[in-house]
Image (cartoon, rainbow, N blue to C red):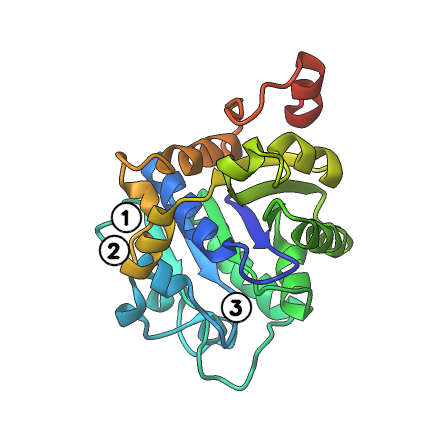
Amino acid sequence: MGKIICFVSGKGGVGKTTSVANVGVALALLGNETLVIDADLGLRNLDLALGLQDAVVYDLLDVSSGVCTTAEAMIHSDKYPNLWFMPASQFKEQTTITAEEMQLVADLVRDTYDFILIDCPAGLNETVSSVGAVSDMGIIVVQPEPFSLRDGDRAAEFIAKAGIQDIRLLVNRYKKELVQTGKMLNILQVIEKMAIQIIGAIPDDDEVLLSGIQGEPLVINQNAAVSKYYLDTAERILGKQIPLTEIQPKKSFFKKMFGK
């Protein structure tokens, strides 16, 4: 039975969709049958992040309403081994998905894939609650700045109420040079403020932006420095104890964060 993981942010612009694309491709590269679903109805971008926008025919709402089968809605590209994609609707009037509709989709795909990653819309709304109700893990994507951390706290509380017990933290776009000068929170400070078990930390890099523009997740470029951070995040999702290179925690802290 596949594991459903939703990616959530309290605010937009933190790199959530980029994170879903890269972590999803990383899981696929590691040999896992992976499905990524765009649940941001009306504002889909995951198709662009994967470079699959020209292949979209059916979408998530078509599956939930019985207009098409799951197989008809799936998009697969030879560029991403073991990866499948289900897009969100772009022009339909319906902009949220109900808990019943999301449960139907989850039941249809859970037994087919090892991992199902769902890109939720930014903010806290019915769709996020519906996705949270079917998810086994929730990943809160934040940037290391006060506004994002506050919104991330609210997002964590929201999906916990939806029923998710396993909530993790993905710190995105931290700038090493600002951390070194004390102008940005370091990863350890973010973890302490959020009090959520961390799953990954992705440094800011212009290559990530360029890969998004090109519609090709950076993680497939093994020569890119940031690629390792996405792969490490995927390995941690698989349960491997990959140390965070950004911090050197004491053993007691490591046990608290990773349960080992």
Q: Residue at x 35, y 57 (%)?
A: 212
Q: Which residue is mark 2?
A: 77
Residue 148 on image: x %, y %: 65, 53
Identify the element where label 3 is drawn.
loop
**Cα separation between marks 1 and 2:** 6 Å
Res 80 label: 1
In the displayed structure, would residue 23 be above or below residue 64?
A: above
Q: Tag 1: residue type?
A: Tyr
Identify the element where label 1 is drawn.
loop
Q: Which residue occupies the extreme top position in the image?
A: 251
Q: Which residue is mark 3?
A: 40
Disc 1 vs disc 2: Cβ atoms closer than 8 Å?
yes
- Write down the quadrant of residue 259 in the picture: top right
- Write down the quadrant of residue 158 in the picture: bottom right
In the displayed structure, would residue 80 be above or below residue 48?
A: above
Q: Tag 2: residue type?
A: Ser
